[in-house]
Image (cartoon, rainbow, N blue to C red):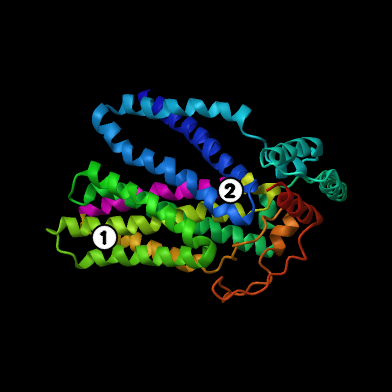
């Protein structure tokens, strides 16, 4: 009976976590332009997630009772209920569902906060384009997650970003759990490894909008693989060296993890973004079930978990190269936008060798949104 209660509590926590984090993350990305997307996406993680994970093991050390520990770390989620009154609904989602008046009210509020004067005709143009798009669409066919699999480019991108996130989730969770196998204090090692989140986010803010998502995701995963695999040659008695290599690998995976969060939200069209990103995260959660078993391989060899995680990171690095680059691009609004996204790119296109991107195939709603966004910012 106790296990059933625990399992039910974990189930409810899973629902709360993805809604409190993922949905807020998506709304945050939708309300900023490409110029500020990386900064806004990683600032909250750098400040609050890092602080929380660094302090977490010491809360566990002080309490030393898993039931009380679970209660203490879960109660703060109650504050998430305030989001209903404090956080505005997604303007893109409102437009998609024909709620143009609410959209205008929210955008005017942002314009007022930013001390911007926006011509009423621009708002009307956005609403008109949205209403025309809604009339043209078959009202009996509400977009669902299955629509991401109906066209070739979206299907490929959705499957690849899901595979990438599954690999990143296993490697990230595996590195976090493997701190107990490094022969040092699990509390100290976990805190140090968690502290790498801050410099990882700083690197993202400084370089993600210069090097792009593909190159940085691939590079950090391959680097994580290299530092993980080199532990094979480290003698067993050199625990500090092994722990250092593992922490550097964790640092690289932290970078990729945060890229993955942003990447999925940028690739999936607004019409199914919440469903798509949630499905990607579910795939990652399912895959991370394997990480305890990977960590348990330490029974057969202390370096074995890092070797497995290293090979997985290597595979993930190459998967990232087959995704389109989203740097500087407007978020796709409709399923048509999602299918056309990245059509003008080739495998060898990287931000260090820029090419002019074709944006003419975006829908009229997306073009109108871009005009309003520039006026409101």
- Image position of 347 with respect to 292: above or below: below
Q: Which residues are magenta?
A: 277-299
Q: Secondary structure at mark 2?
A: helix
Q: Position of residue 28 (x, y in %)?
A: 59, 44
Q: Is residue 177 left or right of residue 27?
A: left
Residue furthest out toward the left: 237
Residue 102 appearing in the image:
yes
Position of the N terminus, as image quadrant, is: top left
- Image position of 253 with respect to 358: above or below: above
Q: Is residue 166 left or right of residue 34?
A: left
Q: Of marks 2 and 1, which one's residue comes earlier in the chain?
A: 1
Q: Position of residue 336 (x, y in %)?
A: 75, 58
Q: Position of residue 264 (x, y in %)?
A: 57, 54
**Residue 347 tag number:** none
* Residue behind mark 2: 277
Residue density around tag 1, few if under 14, some if 14–19, many if 20 or more, within 10 Å: many
At x 47%, y 59%, the residue is 206
Q: Position of residue 255 (x, y in %)?
A: 43, 56
Across the whole image, how many numbered discs are drawn on residues?
Answer: 2
Nearest the eye: 331 or 275: 331
Q: Is residue 273 left or right of residue 200?
A: right
Q: Is residue 160 left or right of residue 248?
A: right
Given this view, does label 2 or label 1 mark the residue nearer the observer?
A: 1
Magenta stretch mostly in which secondary structure? helix
At x 47%, y 29%, the residue is 77
* Residue behind mark 1: 245
Residue 212 appearing in the image:
no
Spatial separation of the CA atoms under disc 2 and disc 1: 32 Å
> Does the magenta run of residues contain 321?
no
At x 39%, y 67%, the residue is 222
């Amino acid at each position: 009976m106790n296990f059933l209660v625990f399992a039910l509590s974990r189930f409810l926590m899973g629902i709360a976590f993805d809604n409190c984090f993922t949905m807020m993350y998506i709304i945050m990305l939708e309300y900023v332009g490409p110029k500020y997307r990386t900064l806004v996406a990683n600032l909250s993680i750098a400040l609050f997630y890092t602080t929380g994970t660094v302090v977490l093991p010491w809360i566990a050390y002080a309490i030393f009772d898993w039931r009380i520990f679970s209660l203490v770390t879960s109660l703060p989620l109650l504050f998430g209920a305030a989001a209903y009154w404090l956080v505005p609904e997604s303007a893109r989602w409102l437009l998609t569902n024909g709620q143009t008046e609410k959209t205008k009210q929210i955008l005017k509020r942002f314009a007022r906060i930013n001390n911007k004067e926006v011509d009423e005709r621009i708002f009307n143009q956005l609403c008109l384009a949205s209403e025309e798009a809604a009339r043209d669409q078959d009202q009996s066919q509400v977009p669902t997650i299955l629509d991401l699999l109906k066209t070739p480019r979206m299907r490929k991108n959705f499957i690849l970003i899901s595979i990438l996130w599954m690999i990143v989730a296993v490697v990230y969770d595996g590195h976090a759990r493997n701190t107990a196998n490094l022969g040092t204090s699990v509390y100290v090692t976990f805190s140090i490894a968690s502290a790498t989140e801050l410099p990882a986010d700083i690197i993202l803010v400084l370089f993600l909008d210069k090097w792009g998502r593909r190159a940085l995701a691939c590079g950090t995963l391959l680097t994580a693989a290299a530092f993980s695999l080199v532990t094979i040659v480290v003698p067993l008695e050199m625990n500090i060296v092994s722990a250092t290599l593992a922490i550097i690998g964790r640092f690289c995976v932290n970078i990729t993890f945060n890229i993955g969060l942003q990447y999925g939200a940028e690739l999936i069209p607004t019409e199914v973004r919440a469903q798509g990103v949630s499905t990607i995260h579910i795939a990652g959660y399912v895959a991370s079930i394997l990480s305890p078993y990977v960590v348990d391989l330490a029974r057969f060899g202390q370096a074995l978990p890092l070797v497995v995680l290293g090979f997985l990171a290597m595979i993930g690095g190459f998967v990232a190269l087959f995704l389109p680059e989203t740097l500087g691009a407007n978020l796709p609004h409709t399923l048509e936008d999602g299918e056309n996204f990245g059509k003008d790119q080739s495998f060898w296109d990287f931000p260090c060798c820029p090419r002019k991107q074709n944006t003419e195939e975006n829908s009229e709603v997306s073009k109108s949104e871009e005009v309003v966004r520039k006026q409101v910012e």
